[in-house]
Amino acid sequence: MPSHASPALRWLRALAIASVAVSTGVIAHVSADGLLPGPRGITVLVVLCTALTAIFLGRRASTLRVVTLVVAGQAFIHSGLAAMAGHRGDPVSVPTPHPAIVPMGTGPRTGSYFDQWSQAQPNGAAGPAVPAWMVHTAVDIAAHPAMAVAHVLAAVAVGLWLSVGERALWAVLALTAALAVRLVRALAGLSVPPAIPVLRLRRSLMQPRISRTLQHSPGVSRRGPPLLLAAH
């Protein structure tokens, strides 16, 4: 049974799994009050998901691999949509005015440069802010853990369904290859002319045998021409 996939078969299978992952990811994102980006954003996510999925489909995929690809693909699409479009009710980032630069005094400096920089930041922010979509995802999972588990179980069920199709596809390919081999052998047998059997005569049939009684007859006492010829 063949196990390695051709480039065309690899990309077709990757596109099928990516399409399912995108569909389930969009449904999960919209059900969590998510917003959708434009067609270009959806196209970029589909292309990225297909390319990443094709890396793991160079040969026949097991059930565990198909399920993992579907679950990971759905999480990737959900996260990508949240990062690109966000959710309803997310805080809108408003640019804060840059604080005025206060000239440093000529006296002795106290503390490090990082301490002075952090004190000059608005609201005392000393590090990068966490993206709103990450905060929304964490809060949503913490507030509705049963819904998150339901999404994962649904993705697992879809992956199991796709794994059945994966096994059926490879079974059909194996059957087709076996039938093709039999057909080629049958055509090759028809093109070769049948062998003509060669009759080999036994040496005993080609050369007549002389009876031993004639070869060694005790009644023959004279050798030579017949008496009638000798009289003449």
Image (cartoon, rainbow, N blue to C red):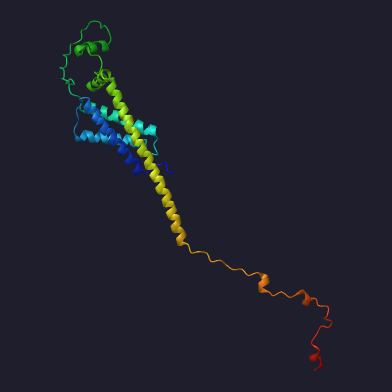
Q: The N terminus is located in which quarter?
A: top left
Name the residue nearer the viewer: 73 or 175: 175
Q: The C terminus is located in which quarter?
A: bottom right
| Residue 181 position in % (x across, y down) | 44, 52
232 vs 194, left or right, is: right
Identify whether 58 is placed above or below 184.
above
| Residue 163 position in % (x across, y down) | 36, 36
The structure residue drawn at horizontal position 32% and vertical position 27%, both measured from the top left corner, is: 153
Name the residue nearer the viewer: 169 or 85: 169
| Residue 206 position in % (x across, y down) | 66, 73
Of all residues, the one furthest to the right in this rendering is 221
User: Which image quadrant for residue 131?
Assistant: top left
105 vs 214, left or right, is: left
User: Which image quadrant for residue 4?
Assistant: top left
The structure residue drawn at horizontal position 26% and vertical position 10%, both measured from the top left corner, is: 115
User: Which image quadrant for residue 190?
Assistant: bottom left
| Residue 96 position in % (x across, y down) | 16, 17
The structure residue drawn at horizontal position 39% and vertical position 48%, both measured from the top left corner, is: 176
Name the residue nearer the viewer: 100 or 138: 138
The structure residue drawn at horizontal position 20% and vertical position 12%, both measured from the top left corner, is: 123
Please give the count of numbered marks on the rendered protein. Answer: 0
